[in-house]
Image: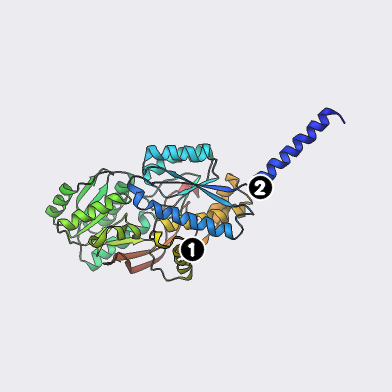
Amino acid sequence: MPIRHVVGIAAALALSTALARADDAPIVIGVPVGLSGANSVVAPSVVQSSELAVEEINAAGGVLGRKLRLEIADDASGAAGAQKAFDALIYSKKVDVIISMETSAARNAGLPAVTKGRKPFIYTSFYEGRSCNKNMFVNAWVPEQQVPPVVDAFTRDKGAKSFFLIGSDYAFGRGMLAFTRAYIEKTGGRVVGEEYLPMDGSDWTSTISKLKESKADALITSTAGGAPNVTLIKQLRGAGVSLPFANLAVDEGTAKSMGAGAEGMYLSASYVTGIDSPENKKFLAAMKSKFGGDLRTPNDLSVPQYEAIYLYKAAVEKAGGTDASKVLEALPTVSFTGPRSLIGMSKQHHAPLTMYLGEVQGDGSVKVVSTFKDVDPGEQCPKLN
């Protein structure tokens, strides 16, 4: 037999073996998340939700016969850390998809790597809205879905006519409060003060003094992830502030970590543990079974993470594989019924969501005050239709 023929057979066998191995190789999900920094309070719950979703899917046979595997990277809750985390996941770890909640600064820093690396990115964090990228889909709330229930309730039920706004000085904090100010003024109210502190700031003394001097009827805050929420509430209560108060950036898990001071605080969320549905009860039972006493409270940042992994699974199955271009075509057409009900990212890469206005109780749990079904995210990314 000619040597070149033998070499040709060997090359064909090698290619066949490589393709077979590729077909059997795990599908790798990259999760850049703030294990350190401002998001470190909530990040462990996001990791736990990711682990449960992957375990459940693998136990049921995986995705197209392939197992899922997680690659977790600390983005340090900021831009510099996110750039390193995204680069490592996309170029070194060769992940197939990025799925995670992050600060807005971290998201923006990671998007260039997503675009250059041509990876699907499901962003699972509530955020200030209007971040548009052909590779990014969002299954969490935006201001159009979250702010009106709070302002309307304070105006209607608390008689509030004047509002004071407090935020962390970054894209999310300023973006949320810009929308809030516009909505308050549109509906006949007044903003009598607006103050910001850097994301790593912890002394709110001056801000609280200005709040008291303003004689505002109600307070609405939009502070970063975990730690700033905790320090602000402690200092507010320590200063004797008792006016109606809503936090646009707090999740149920963080509310519990705030202690007794959080009692009476309002939040607007797409997920609370008290949702009475078979899917939510099954999810909570599975989380408790897997993590036991180490379980972090499922919340409005961790549950979208769980659902996003299932949405990616549905997209891969519809696409017939992990080819990024085909998965991106499939993502706006698939849906998943999870703890928050039916979720599909069909509205300009965003998801219509049922929203809940809740009040924090003395034990840190959230009592649902009002429910708003299938709230549209509004005009977010019209060019991505």
Give the crowd class for mark 2: few <14, some 14-19, many >=20 residues within 10 Å.
Answer: some
Q: In which quarter of the image is the N terminus?
A: top right
Residue at the spot 45% in from the left edge and 70% down from the top edge: 277
Residue 168, given in percent of the width and then of the height, sits at 27, 47
Query: Contact, CB < 8 Å: mark 1 with mark 2?
Result: no
Which disc is residue 116 wearing? none
Name the residue furthest top: 3
Q: Where is residue 318 in the image (x, y as percent from the top left)?
A: 61, 54
Secondary structure state at the residue bearing disc 1: strand
| Amino acid type for the residue under numbered disc 1 | Gly
Label 2: which residue?
A: 23
If you read the primary sequence from the N terminus, does the residue marked by circle 1 or circle 2 appear first?
A: 2
**Disc 1 marks which residue?**
338
> 155 or 252: which is nearer to us?
252
Report the front residue among 54 and 217: 54
Position of 254 compared to 82: left or right? left
